[in-house]
Image (tube, helix red, strand yellow):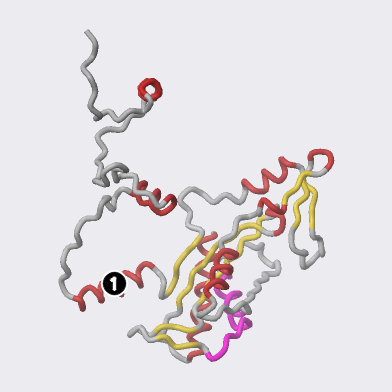
Amino acid sequence: MLGLLARAARDAIVPSIRAILDRHDVTPGLVGSIQTFGSYAANFHPHVHVLLTDGAFTEEGEFLQLPYFDARSSRRSSAAACSSACTAPSGSRRRFSVHGEQMVPTEDVQGAERLARYLTRGPLPIDVVEKVEGGRLRVRTPPDPRTGLVEKILDPLDLIHALTTQIPNPGQHMVRYYAWYSNRSRGARAAVGARLAGPQPHPEPGPSPSGASWALLLRRIFEVDPLLCAACGSEMKIVSVITEPIVIDAILRHLARTGGRDPFEGRAPPAA
């Protein structure tokens, strides 16, 4: 159902952008972040945060900027687009809201980063939780638009239960790319660019194989290549992987006794 909700947001926004530009052959760029939590992370409130280009792209790649944006038209479209995904009982009132007033200029890089962080934030920042008398927890939040509450006292187990209900299913993508930013659209543009560029020379292999995802992650996080020798800088290869705890402990004890000496360092022959 969360996937249907995200696609419904796309189906509501794309026609609105095309109607404003009066072009049905253009495609905007959308990045949708699915969130399931509301205030205090204690209630299930599925909604979608969307980063949207201020215009749309033609098939030739030209960007057409919007002269204005009317969130009300998207709200009307969302009610129609979400009707197939709505689980409300028959006869009950279906309500949809759209907030589209947050604009970030192209040159405001920090503003775009702050907005992206907000769109993909976790259910509850740790700095809004504090322990109070009786072992309970006070959770602070911006004023609730309906009740005006700014904090709530919860039992620790109740808060843990609320947070665990927000954990997505294994393999479920909570950030999705649509329209001009979709995988299909980007792949098609890359294929066209490759055909126009012609055959390219095969790049020289880098110091680490691209398939070693664990090594790539370590380079990104710690800025250290784990497959390069710290002494000579040459590329290292994995010879074997040891997973037995007994063998690992024996190796570590031996290194502790020898002071971590280089195993290839010259040494005297063993005593008779």
Q: Is residue 248 above or below residue 27?
A: above
State which quadrant residue 187 falls in.
bottom left
Q: Along the horizontal axis of the image, is 39 left or right of 211?
A: right
Q: Give the image location of residue 69, x and y in percent.
A: 58, 85
Q: In this picture, is 218 found above or below 81?
A: above
Residue at the location (54% across, 81% down)?
Answer: 105
Badge 1: residue crowd in 10 Å (few <14, some 14–19, many ≥20): few
Q: On the picture, is 51 further left or further right than 41?
A: left
The residue furthest top is 272
Residue nearer the viewer, 41 or 118? 118
Picture coordinates of residue 27 (x, y %)?
Answer: 42, 80
In the picture of the structure, the residue carrying the numbered disc 1 is 190
**Mark 1 element type:** helix
Residue 2, picture quadrant: bottom right
Question: Residues in magenta?
Answer: 67-83
Dominant SS type (magenta):
helix
Coordinates of residue 168 in the picture (x, y in percent): 54, 51
Q: Which of 199 and 218 is in front in this view?
A: 218
Direction from residue 236 to residue 144 in the image, left or right = right
Residue depicted at 79% across the width and 60% down the height: 150
Location of residue 141 with respect to 21 vertically, above or below: above
Q: Residue at coordinates 56% horizontally, 78% vertically from top-left?
A: 104
Residue at 77 percent of width and 44 percent of height = 131
Q: Is residue 71 magenta?
A: yes
- Outermost residue on the right side: it is 133
